[in-house]
Image (tube, helix red, strand yellow):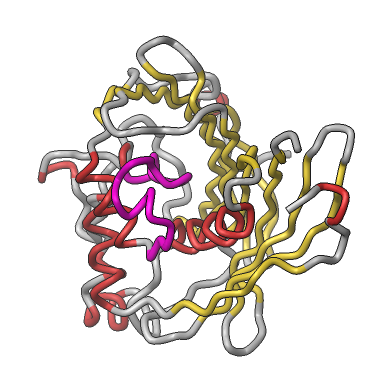
Amino acid sequence: MSSLLTPELLAHIGRSAPPHRELVTRRDIRKYAIATGQRLRKYLDGDEAPPMFHVALFWPVVERDEIAPDGVAIDSFLPDFPLKRAMAGGLKIEYARPVFPGDWLTATRTLTDIYEKQGRSGPLIFYEVVMQVTNDAGDAVLTETTTRILR
Amino acid sequence: MNIDTLNIGDELPTRDVECDVVQLFQYNAALWNAHRIHFDYPYATQEEGYPGLVIAGPLMGDWLSQCVIEWLGDHGRLVSIEYSNRAAAYVGEVLHVGGIVTAVDPAARTVSVELYVRNDAGETITPGAAVVELGAG
């Protein structure tokens, strides 16, 4: 029934990328807060990270030969999907505790699902990545679930 | 803000946002996102066929989170937020951010809200939802 999703591709479900540990700095919080137009003092001053700061903290930093001609970092964690053109997807974040400057956070990404649907103009591939963020004490900080659509 | 005075249908304060090219640059620089549709006008329009520089999807998600946390103030915490980027928006557009209360649970002290980023045509380009938990008292 599914034409695009080979067993080989589906075997990637459940795989995780190596954990990624980053330091939260006041300067990076301030840059993010200003760039997003925050209006609360605690964010503009970098005393606490805005709710979506982790998007910036864990955006891939790759070397130049891993950047595609369109400027997008090539994500070696993802399998080589038979559809290439990414459409905007959705995101859900569940929060456990706030983030402050000085925190070391570790993100672990897991490919949790790949499925196919028939769109109006052809097949679409959906995939879901769950990113779990913890602090150095091992406490959960947040969980982010991203769904992306390829056409 | 008090759980007993919140009602389904209550509207969150709305905000108009207009992302200019400087803000879009700073946002993508803060992420280290070099996707050319956000800063390379000839590439965005001629190669990818967009009418202008594309506002980054997660920036619209961030505006939704700001709508919730500014409304919530110090009365509680954000439990979860979700959104989907349904349609693109471009530098120069004025966008409208807001939300509405969809559920109130006094026992759990949680409030659910539906969120939106709309364009000037009234189209919801980024629908979302969030749950907040109010503190005691």
Vertically, is B81 above or below B37? above
Nearer to me, A93 or B90: A93
Q: What residue lies at 56% left-to-right and 37% top-to-bottom?
A: A145
Q: In this view, does B79 lie to the left or right of B3?
A: left
In this image, A116 relative to A43: left or right? right
**Residue with the most extreme top position:** A137
Which stretch appears magenta?
A37-56
Q: Is the magenta stretch mostly helix, strand or loop?
A: loop
Q: Position of residue A48 (x, y in %)?
A: 38, 40
Tell me where residue A75 sits by quadrant. Answer: top left
Q: Position of residue A99 (x, y in %)?
A: 41, 33
Residue positioned 82% across, 47% down in the render: B3
Q: Position of residue B71 (x, y in %)?
A: 62, 59
Q: Which residue is drawn at 45% across and 56% down?
A: B58
Image quadrant where residue A85 sits: bottom left
For residue A126: magenta? no
